[in-house]
Image: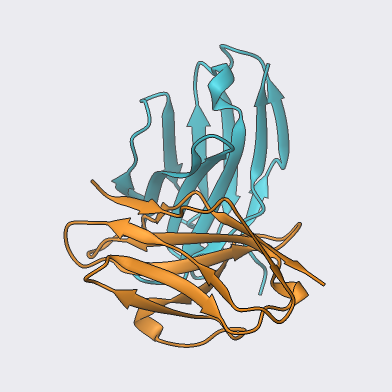
Chain colours: A cyan, B orange
């Protein structure tokens, strides 16, 4: 079956703009998590959605938000972009519940100029 | 505080040598521990998790609650094992949130 897909794969924005990233989970997966990966901070958890509800949230400012649709597809939005938001944003999907294997997408590379 | 520590950024070994990638964690409670791997130009993928107690691609990891460690071991390294390895933990309850270590790059020399 098809893996997790993320669009777009690459994005260049300027400071102050906003951006929306999309993630399509594996069919049947209801949990979608988002991570930010940077050379300095590594992989950091942003938030998790399950059945259209945010189930957990990491320590990121309110500029970072997300949502999940009824078909389990998820989007994350970053408003008022800062240079430090440049990163690889990874999405992962899994079945419901905890301890399930998470399947990661290829990521969206965001560059903020 | 919830934390995963991988002290080595780079581990270089020769083919056939034993490998041990270190992972220590801090968590108030009983977490679930995982090792994820990212091969060159591939996605991050699960290698193994402690609850399964299985060996994948010759790798094993034992959870030591006393030392709060979850080191990854393989008796004989292969060149195809070269990759970035991440240790991660997840708390109990209805969540898939993963806390990752900073990763260790394993380079297996021929």
Q: On screen, A14 above or below A21?
A: above
Q: Is residue A47 above or below residue B73?
A: above
The one of A40 and A5 positioned closer to us in this rendering: A40
Picture coordinates of residue B102 (x, y %)?
Answer: 50, 49
- The residue sitting at the right extreme is B110
Q: Is residue A76 above or below residue A100?
A: above
Query: Does A83 sit left or right of B25 as displayed?
Result: right
Q: Residue at x 61, y 28 (%)?
A: A86
Does residue B98 sit above or below A64 in this rendering?
A: below
Q: What x and y, as percent, mark residue A76? A: 50, 38
On the question of residue A97 being in view, the answer is: no
Q: Quadrant of residue B37?
A: bottom right
* Count of numbered labels shown in the rendering: 0
Quadrant in the picture for residue B51: bottom left
Q: Residue at x 23, y 56 (%)?
A: B27
Point 67% across, 69% down: residue? A2
- Quadrant containing the C terminus of chain B is bottom right
Asked if residue A47 shows in the view, the reply is yes
* Left-right relation of B29 to B83: left
Residue A51 position, x and y percent, is: 36, 57
Q: Describe residue B23's horizontal placement relative to residue A5 as left or right.
A: left
Percent x, y of residue A50: 36, 56
Q: Residue furthest top?
A: A16
């Amino acid at each position: 079956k098809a893996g997790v897909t993320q669009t777009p794969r690459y994005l260049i924005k300027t400071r102050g703009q906003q951006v929306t990233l999309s993630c399509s989970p594996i069919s049947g997966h209801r949990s979608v998590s988002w991570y930010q990966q940077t050379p300095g901070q590594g992989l950091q958890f942003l938030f998790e959605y399950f059945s259209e509800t945010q189930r957990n949230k990491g320590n990121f400012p309110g500029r970072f938000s997300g949502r999940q649709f009824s078909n389990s597809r998820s989007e994350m939005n970053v408003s008022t972009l800062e240079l430090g938001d440049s990163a690889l944003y990874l999405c992962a999907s899994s079945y419901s519940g905890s301890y399930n294997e998470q399947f990661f997408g290829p990521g969206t590379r965001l560059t903020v100029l | 505080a919830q934390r995963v520590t991988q002290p080595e950024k780079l581990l270089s070994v020769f083919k056939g040598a034993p490998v041990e990638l270190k992972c220590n964690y801090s968590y108030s409670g009983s977490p679930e521990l995982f090792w994820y791997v990212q091969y060159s130009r591939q996605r991050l993928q699960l290698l193994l998790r402690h609850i399964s107690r299985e060996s994948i691609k010759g790798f094993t990891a034992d959870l030591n609650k006393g030392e709060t460690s979850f080191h990854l071991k393989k008796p004989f390294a292969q060149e195809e094992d070269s990759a970035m390895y991440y240790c991660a933990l997840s708390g109990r309850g209805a969540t898939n949130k993963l806390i990752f270590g900073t990763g260790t790059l394993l380079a297996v020399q021929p």
